[in-house]
Amino acid sequence: MIKLLKYTCIVLSGVMLLASCKKNNLVLDRDPLTHPEAARFLLYPTAANSFYAYNILELPSPGSVFNLPVGVTTVSNVDRKVKFTFSSLRAVAGVQYTAPTEITIKAGKALDTLKIQGLFAGYTSTRIDTLKIKITTESGFIGKNAYQDSVMLIIKKTCPIVVADFAGDFQVLVDQWQDYFPGDIVPLTVSGDTVMFKYPAGNATPIKILVNKANGSTSVAKQTYGFYGPDQFSAQSVASTDNFVNPCDKIISVRLNHTTAVDNYGNYTIKFQKL
């Protein structure tokens, strides 16, 4: 009897073990990552919450296209298609971006790339858009994986700082010193990383604006620049959010403190934009 009980316990243990294994297999079968024909975005490990920064470059180049890898969980001997939808509060297809609404995963492959092209002309220097890209499930297309079916692109345009671009005729946008009026045309010259202009003062010499290409800031070391009546005036930059270059819109700005040997006349911003 004792031997029979032991044998029965062994048999029951084996049945329970098999049932447990079968249960685990069922859980694995429900794992969406192993579900057949599931398409998903392959998220970069450095990204947080599926958000990506996309800075549009001015000139067509590989860097001006955002490449978004897309994968499927199985390999097939026939071509398969993945369908996408795009949504945004402001960004419009054909105006701010272009992108295909579907791609084809070739037979024998499990990966492809969705290419989004931002349109530089569709953005001002301050405009930022959020574009949501989502894999959809439709007849004739691979079904989506619910865990990795959408990403968000934060789109804006960017331009490299080329100081040589700040040479030529510029329009005055702001002159708080009031030697110029908005709309006046002033020639600017460039030497290395320095942009120069003259005030219409007596015996005027160029004010030299140093451009920091690393952060887009501007500065002026103290210098004399001309006479108003018998007094020789000097200028130097002071800390301000007005000290910048905007390489996309070709704007240069600096806030200057104007002084003579005996008086301080205060701080005034001057801002130019290339014609």
Image (tube, rainbow, N blue to C red):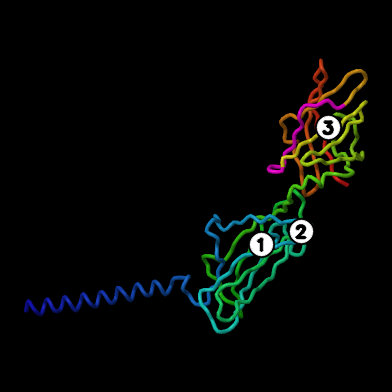
Of circles 2 and 3, which is in front? 3
In this view, the residue farthest toward the front is: 192
Separation (CA) of disc 1 from disc 3: 41 Å
List the residue tagged with mark 2. Answer: 59
Mark toward the start of the polypeptide (1 vs 3): 1
Residue 58: x and y in percent read 76, 56
Left or right: residue 104 versus residue 252 is left
Q: Is residue 170 magenta?
A: no
Given residues 75 and 10, the one toward you in this image is: 75
Mark 1 neighbour density, 10 Å: few (under 14) some (14–19) many (20 or more): many
Vertical placement of 223 versus 25: above or below? Answer: above
Q: Amino acid at mark 2?
A: Leu
Residue hosting label 1: 66
* Mark 2–mark 3 distance (CA, rounded to whole Å): 32 Å
Task: Out of 94 and 162, give the one closest to the viewer.
Answer: 162
Quadrant in which the N terminus is drawn: bottom left
Residue stretch in magenta: 213-225
Please give the count of numbered marks on the rendered protein. Answer: 3
Q: Amino acid at mark 1?
A: Phe
Which quadrant of the figure has residue 189?
top right
Q: Secondary structure at mark 2?
A: loop
Q: Is residue 70 above or below residue 141?
A: above
Residue on which disc 3 sits: 207
Instruction: Estimate how packed mark 3 is, as few (under 14), some (14 to 19) or many (20 or more) residues with alpha carbons within 10 Å.
Output: many
Q: Nearer the viewer, residue 84 or 167?
A: 167
Marks 1, 2: nearer the viewer:
2
